[in-house]
Image: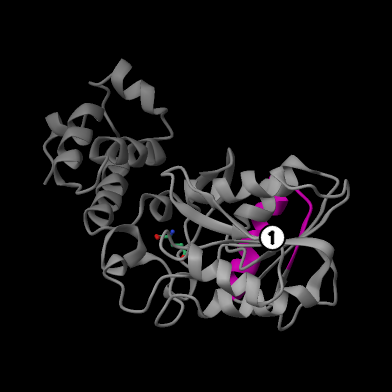
C-alpha cells in the first residue's frame, strides 16, 4: 500500500530508483513517470512535491515492476530514438542501438549515385532504412524482414515519419522481388549460440532470431555475403554490422566471394564493428 505522502513525483522516483537495477536507475524511473503522467522530465526537478494521481501511480508501479525484472526501457515506453527519429519498437524486433548509427554514417559516406537504390536486410523497426531515407529523400530505399510483425512495424514507422521506404516480407533474399542495388546494408544476427552475453541486460528480452546466428555467429553474414553479389549493381556496396571480434572473419568472407575494396570500420567504442566491400 502506498501512503499518501509518497505520491509525490520525487518520492515515487526515489523509491523506484532504489529498486531498479540498471546503469541509469534514476533516468529509467523519470522516463517511466514521464510516460504515465505526460509530464516532461525536467518538471520533476522543478516541482518535486507535485502529487501524482492514484491511477497514474498504479500504472507507474506496474512499469517499475517490469523494469525491476529487467524488461528494457524501450519496450516499456514503446519507442526508441535512432538517428534522431522517434521509432516505435516492439518485443518482436531488436531495439535500435547507438552503435548502428555508425553503420548509417558509413553508408552516407559512400560514393553513391544521386538516386541510389538501397536495400536494408532484416530491417526490424526499419531503423537503418528510415535513417537513410530521412537523409536522402531521392534514394529508393527498400527493406525486408522475415518476421511479419517487424514488416508491419517498419511500415508503421515509415508512415508515422512520412518517409518513403518500401518494406517486404522476405528471409534475406529468398522472397525479394528482382532488383539491382547500389547499396545493400544489414545489421543481421551475429552472436554465437550460447554466448554468455545473451544472459545479460536487454538482450534477454529481445528476439533470439534477431541476435543469434549459429555456433560462430556468422551463419547469416555468410548467407548475405554469398548471395548479395547477385543483387548488387556493378560497383555496388555491401555493408554489414558484426561483433567486435569478427572483422577478420567477415573480411575473409567478402574477399572469398570476390568483393574488392574490403575494409572494416569502427563503432563509437573504437572497435571494428562493420565491414564493407
Ligand atoms: N549489438 C547487439 C548486442 O550485442 C547485437 C545486435 C545483433 O546481433 N545484430 O547486444
Q: Secondary structure at mark 1?
A: helix
Q: Residue at x 54, y 69 (%)?
A: 250
- Of residues 31 and 247, the one nearer the viewer is 247
Residue 46: percent from the left, percent from the top?
A: 32, 16
Residue 81 left/right relative to 17:
right
Q: Residue at x 15, y 33 (%)?
A: 6
| Image quarter where ligand 1 lies | bottom left
**Quadrant location, the C terminus:** bottom right
Residue 173 left/right relative to 63:
right
Q: Quadrant of residue 204?
A: bottom left
Main secondary structure along the magenta-highlighted residues: helix
Residue 217 left/right relative to 81:
left
Q: Quadrant of residue 149?
A: bottom right
Residue 93 visible in rendering: no
Q: Residue at x 67, y 79 (%)?
A: 226
Q: Is residue 33 above or below residue 158?
A: above
- Of residues 253 and 273, the one nearer the viewer is 253
Q: Which residues are magenta?
A: 147-167
Residue 134: percent from the left, percent from the top?
A: 72, 43
Residue 191 lies within the magenta run: no
Amino acid at each position: 500500500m502506498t501512503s499518501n505522502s509518497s505520491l509525490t513525483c520525487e518520492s515515487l522516483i526515489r523509491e523506484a530508483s532504489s529498486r531498479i537495477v540498471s546503469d541509469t536507475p534514476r533516468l529509467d524511473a523519470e522516463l517511466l513517470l514521464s510516460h504515465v503522467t505526460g509530464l516532461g522530465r525536467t518538471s520533476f526537478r522543478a516541482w518535486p512535491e507535485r502529487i501524482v494521481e492514484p491511477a497514474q501511480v498504479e500504472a507507474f508501479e506496474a512499469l517499475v515492476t517490469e523494469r525491476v525484472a529487467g524488461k528494457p526501457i524501450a519496450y516499456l515506453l514503446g519507442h526508441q530514438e535512432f538517428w534522431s527519429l522517434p521509432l516505435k519498437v516492439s518485443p518482436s524486433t531488436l531495439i535500435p542501438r547507438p552503435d548502428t548509427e555508425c553503420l548509417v554514417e558509413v553508408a552516407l559516406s559512400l560514393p553513391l549515385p544521386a538516386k541510389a537504390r538501397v536495400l536494408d536486410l532484416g530491417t526490424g523497426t526499419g531503423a537503418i532504412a528510415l535513417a537513410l531515407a530521412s537523409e536522402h529523400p531521392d534514394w529508393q530505399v527498400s527493406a525486408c524482414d522475415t518476421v511479419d510483425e517487424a514488416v508491419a512495424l517498419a511500415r508503421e514507422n515509415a508512415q508515422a515519419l512520412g518517409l518513403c521506404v518500401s518494406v517486404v516480407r522476405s528471409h534475406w533474399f529468398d522472397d525479394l522481388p528482382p532488383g539491382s542495388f547500389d547499396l545493400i546494408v544489414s545489421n543481421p544476427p551475429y552472436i554465437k549460440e550460447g554466448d554468455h552475453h545473451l544472459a545479460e541486460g536487454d538482450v534477454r528480452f529481445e528476439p533470439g532470431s534477431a541476435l543469434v546466428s549459429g555456433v560462430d555467429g556468422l551463419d547469416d553474414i555468410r548467407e548475405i555475403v554469398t548471395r548479395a553479389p547477385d543483387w548488387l549493381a556493378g560497383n555496388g556496396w555491401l555493408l554489414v554490422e558484426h561483433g567486435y571480434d569478427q572483422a577478420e572473419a567477415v573480411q575473409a568472407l567478402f574477399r572469398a566471394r570476390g568483393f574488392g575494396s574490403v575494409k572494416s570500420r569502427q563503432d563509437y567504442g573504437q572497435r571494428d564493428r562493420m565491414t564493407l566491400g
